[in-house]
Image (cartoon, grey):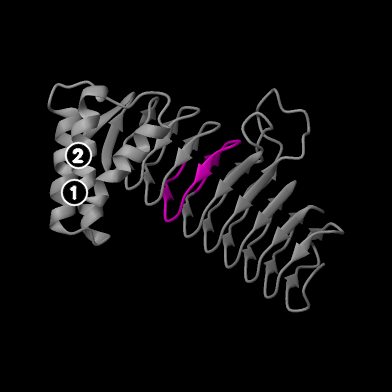
Amino acid sequence: MIDNTAFVHPSAIVEEGAVIGAGAHIGPFCYVGSQVEIGEGTFLKSHVVVNGITRIGRENQIFQFASIGEVNQDLKYAGEPTRVEIGDRNRIRESVTIHRGTEQGGGLTKVGNDNLLMVNTHIAHDCVVGNRCILANNATLGGHVSVDDFAIIGGMTAVHQFCIIGAHVMVGGCSGVAQDVPPYVIAQGNHATPFGLNIEGLKRRGFEKDALHAIRAAYKTLYRSGKTLEEAKPEIEALAQQQPAVQLFMDFFARSTRGIIR
């Protein structure tokens, strides 16, 4: 179903069964598969492929040669009806690839709202990207990676399968991330190691002095006290009880399976 107010260029192919929302724009030489839903006001520039069971929300901008919802690169995948979901107001630049999930990974690759995915970003099967994240040119997420809200991943950076990138993290360019990166941390290198806190980013997002002091204290306990993670956890938990911003560390530790960068 194509809304009467949507625009579909004569050279585009929209398969029967696709849903195109009000005011959406399907530019020249795009392909939209039969199980795709594209929300109100979303703009496909040209030469965009959207396939599989894929839902794209409102007011996204998708640039030329992006490929969304195609068959993933997991050799175990055998055509199961897995999905891609993309939220609202994302900017998905040229040649970005976002692959459908796998049954083994939960069946869903998900991108939230207000993200910027720069040129040639790759989001593999079963990844979950939060809100207001930036993935710079050629950033690559292996399968099952989680990227939490407000994270920034530098250009040419690769993230290993099953890793978690915590909220407000900044990963420098040309890094290789092989373990989980706790929230608020700046990481850099191959393999990536911690280089302090993303204080400037937190200030821009309105974190107050008390929260910043508590986050600094948690970071020092985690990385500069000489304690193991298990030894550091009780102290960080005590800080979290006094300052809610520190609770992100505890929530992150509960999800972490690959160990944290050191």
Report, in whole angstroms, how far the alpha carbon at label 2 lies from the one at label 1: 7 Å
- In the image, 44: left or right of 193? right
Tell me residue 70's x, y (percent): 70, 41
At horizontal 52% and vertical 59% (from top left) the residue drawn is: 90
Say above or below: 129 vs 41.
Answer: above
The quadrant the C terminus occupies is top left
The answer to the question of whether label 2 and label 1 lie on touching residues, with beta carbons closer than 8 A, is: yes
In the rendered structure, find residue 238 and report the number of the disc placed on it: 2
In the rendered structure, find residue 13 and report the number of the disc placed on it: none
Tell me residue 163's x, y (percent): 44, 30
Quickly name the residue at label 1.
242
Q: Identify the amino acid type marked 1.
A: Gln
Q: Identify the amino acid type marked 2.
A: Ala
Secondary structure of residue under mark 2: helix
Tell me residue 10's x, y (percent): 81, 67
- In the image, 150: left or right of 122? left
At horizontal 70% and vertical 74% (from top left) the residue drawn is: 22
In this view, the residue in front, 76 or 9, is 76
Secondary structure of residue under mark 1: helix
Residue 124 can be seen, yes or no? yes
Q: Report the number of numbered marks.
A: 2
At horizontal 77% and vertical 28% (from top left) the residue drawn is: 78
In this view, the residue in front, 180 or 42, is 180
Q: Which residues are magenta?
A: 119-139
User: Which corner quadrant of the image does residue 20 belong to?
Assistant: bottom right
At horizontal 66% and vertical 38% (from top left) the residue drawn is: 107
| Classed neighbour count for the residue bearing mark 1: other residues with Cα under 10 Å, few (<14), some (14–19), many (≥20) | few
Find out whether residue 136 is within the magenta segment. yes
